[in-house]
Image (spheres, coloured by chain):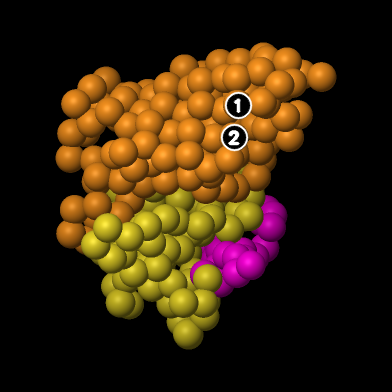
Chain colours: A yellow, B orange
Amino acid sequence: EPEVTQTPSHQVTQMGQEVILRCVPISNHLYFYWYRQILGQKVEFLVSFYNNEISEKSEIFDDQFSVERPDGSNFTLKIRSTKLEDSAMYFCASSGRGTSGGTTYEQYFGPGTRLTVT
Amino acid sequence: RKEVEQDPGPFNVPEGATVAFNCTYSNSASQSFFWYRQDCRKEPKLLMSVYSSGNEDGRFTAQLNRASQYISLLIRDSKLSDSATYLCVVSSLDTGRRALTFGSGTRLQVQP
């Protein structure tokens, strides 16, 4: 069964450093997303990406964040200057093209990257 | 008011029990509804989409009441492996908007 993969599984970085989190979405999917979950809190939407551009972003996704699809398979989230409060689990998700009355809006999540900022 | 509200639990039930989770959402523009399950420190896994007519998948039944902005999930014949946090999730699905809004989840513990 196709699945979303993410690397690394755990990233430890110092405050102020840049990190890049990587994701390989499901191969025939067209929409890609990043979410985060701070320990003990709910999952929060960061950004969605379609047709090589951001289609939606939340208030959390400020100028320190950026996303890119550098090739036909990878989807990355870059955090430019990490803060202590960026420590969280970051989940990548993907979904297929929606069709009227269909169910392909369903989003499938990768296993996550645990980011620890010290 | 929270966008998606769930009873945090935990619900402690014996194996074989029937358990029901409820969820309310505040955005009347919400178009798509889902139940995900999340095991401790793992990713959310899609359990089922929720359709207006209600739908069933094996031991799981989901219902949607748009007028009351209320979603439910019923689990029959609970198994130990059902122990997890159940996340109620909605999406408005306006043009270009596919962001999922998650509830905080309801924790289920099925006991032998």
Quarter location, residue A51: bottom left
Quarter location, residue A99: bottom left
**Left or right: A105 with respect to B86?**
left
Quarter location, residue A34: bottom left
Vertical placement of residue A55 versus A73, above or below: above
Q: Amino acid at mark 1?
A: Arg
Question: Which chain is mark 2 on?
Answer: B
- Name which residue lies at 53% across and 42% down: B57
Residue underneath mark 1: B76
Residue B30 locus on image (x, y percent):
24, 40
**Placement of the C terminus of chain A among the 4 image quadrants:** top right
2 or 1: tag closer to the N-terminus? 2
Residue B73 locus on image (x, y percent):
47, 29
Q: Can you tell which mark lies on residue B59?
A: 2
Q: Amino acid at mark 2?
A: Arg
Q: Is residue A39 visible?
A: no
Residue A110 versus residue B73: which sits nearer the camera?
B73
Mark 1 and mark 2 in contact (Cβ < 8 Å)?
yes
Residues rendered magenta in the picture: A1-25
Disc 2 and disc 1: Cα gap in Å?
5 Å
- Name which residue lies at 34% across and 42% down: B51
Residue B24 locus on image (x, y percent):
33, 24
